[in-house]
Amino acid sequence: MRVLIIGGGGREHALACCLAKSSRISEIVCTPGNAGTAALGRNAVVNAADHDALLRFAQDESIDLIIVGPEQPLCDGIVDKFQAAGLRIFGPTAAAARIEGDKAYAKMLMRRAHIPTAEAHVFDRHQDARDYVASREAGVVVKAAGLAGGKGVFVCPDPADAMLAVDSIMVAGEFGDAGRTVIVEELLKGQELSVFALVDDRTIYVLDTAQDHKPIGEGDTGPNTGGMGAISPAPIATADVMATVEREVLVPIVDALRSDGAPYRGLLYVGLMLTAGGPKVLEFNCRFGDPETQALLMRLDSDLLDVIEAVVDGRLAETEIKWNPKSAVTVVMASEGYPGPFERSKTIEGLDVAGSMNDVRVFHAATRRIGGRVITTGGRVLGVTALGAGLAEAKRLAYEAVDVIRFDNAYCRRDIADKAIAAAAARA
Ligand code: AMP
Ligand code: GLY
């Protein structure tokens, strides 16, 4: 079987690594891919925004299964188009992906289905948003309703900053059309958790747990990023929390989508805040999270191809997924300056040594091979991932591997997993 993966980050390399273990796969093609995916199969250059070109490519290459990594092509309807052409593709239709692509829609569905989430107001008019923010004394969160590459959310403990955020989204047009509608919501406090579920219209299969580390700085300080590290399992995701999320969030949202004529098939990601009043939804995503997927898939003992095909073919109810009981820690090595401006094209050294360490896997995110060298091409460069008997051992191994990898201006947080390790020690 020939598989095409659309995307080129750490998530896609982790998916490709898992699929490469499947005996039924003859070739993995990735577009655009990175130096990591190139080593497992082949990278192809196809304009990702041009779905006709992607479709022609998949047909010309006799691709049997397509897996879509990022949200943009899903929200733009790539699944609808490929399915109409008779291809097998993993991911939700545009109508179902709207759960991520339109935060106002997601809020409306949540409200209708009584799903716990931050209280929110939706504004299409700038002055209305300003008037509302001016009436608030407590901090708020201001969000562009559309897709903004993870940058359209402003957490504003000071309402004065919320006013600036509303202006930059709605007047300066920082996110273009994605900011035509703005959501102003209650600022929730607590620890964040990502819950991943596979969904095939009706069946919901909740995956093992993982947690992201979003802020750039140690101790969870500084601006939010796409994620600077991840752990799996996530000790804060207790059986109780997971049962609550399944009952109060996943079941009602999957029902609500189906009743809305948008049955969900693919990976549904719930971003949650574990508040004193229970788990509350921050957002839904219509795809695997990154870097959480790197830590999570490191622990997958089943054949990922079987799992993905079960979703695509609507056989999820018959599927069982096995997880390695060990813990995984992913440390993201980034380019200094990210999530702001940073330099690229730095040569990365030490990849082979790190990659040959036991229970270590270096997932590539923003890398490219040029001749005999691998260079950096973006902000989040690598996801150095290790398995250990517990989180502390996985963390030690991950940083041992990080320490043999070098590139100019490399930056990583040194405290990935610490909060979970400390919490576990306090409980013991
Ligand atoms: P989102 O893309 O909506 O998940 O927002 C990105 C990040 O902003 C989240 O991962 C949280 O760290 C933060 N955030 C979003 N909504 C809220 C909220 N209502 N209260 C506190 N933090 C939030
Ligand atoms: N790690 C956050 C995300 O994938 O959206």
Image (spheres, grey):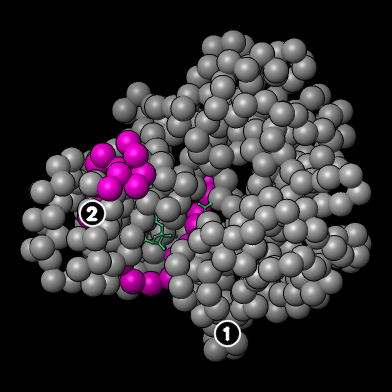
Question: Which is closer to the viewer, label 2 or label 1?
Answer: 2
Residue 144 appears left or right of 128: right
Q: Nearer the viewer, residue 396 or 344?
A: 344
Give the residue type at disc 2: Val
Residue 271 appears left or right of 351: left
Question: What span is colored magenta in the figure?
Answer: 172-199
The residue drawn where x is 41% and y is 41% is: 147
Identify the secondary structure beneath mark 1: helix
Identify the secondary structure beneath mark 2: helix
The residue drawn where x is 36% and y is 44% is: 175
- Is residue 114 one of those drawn in magenta? no
State the image coordinates of residue 311 (x, y, percent, origin top left).
Answer: 60, 32
Q: Nearer the viewer, residue 52 or 235?
A: 52
Residue that mark 1 sits on? 422
Which quadrant would the N terminus be assigned to in this image? top right
Q: Earlier in the sequence, mark 2 or mark 1?
A: 2
State the image coordinates of residue 106 (x, y, percent, origin top left).
Answer: 32, 42
Check the image and report above or below for 355 versus 63: below
Residue 38 appears left or right of 135: right
* Residue 166, label in figure: 2
The residue drawn where x is 70% and y is 18% is: 58
Check the image and report above or below for 66 versus 19: above
* Residue 158, label in figure: none
Image quadrant of ligand 1 equals: bottom left
User: Which of the 4 quarters of the picture holds residue 244?
Assistant: bottom left
State the image coordinates of residue 34 (x, y, percent, origin top left).
Answer: 74, 43
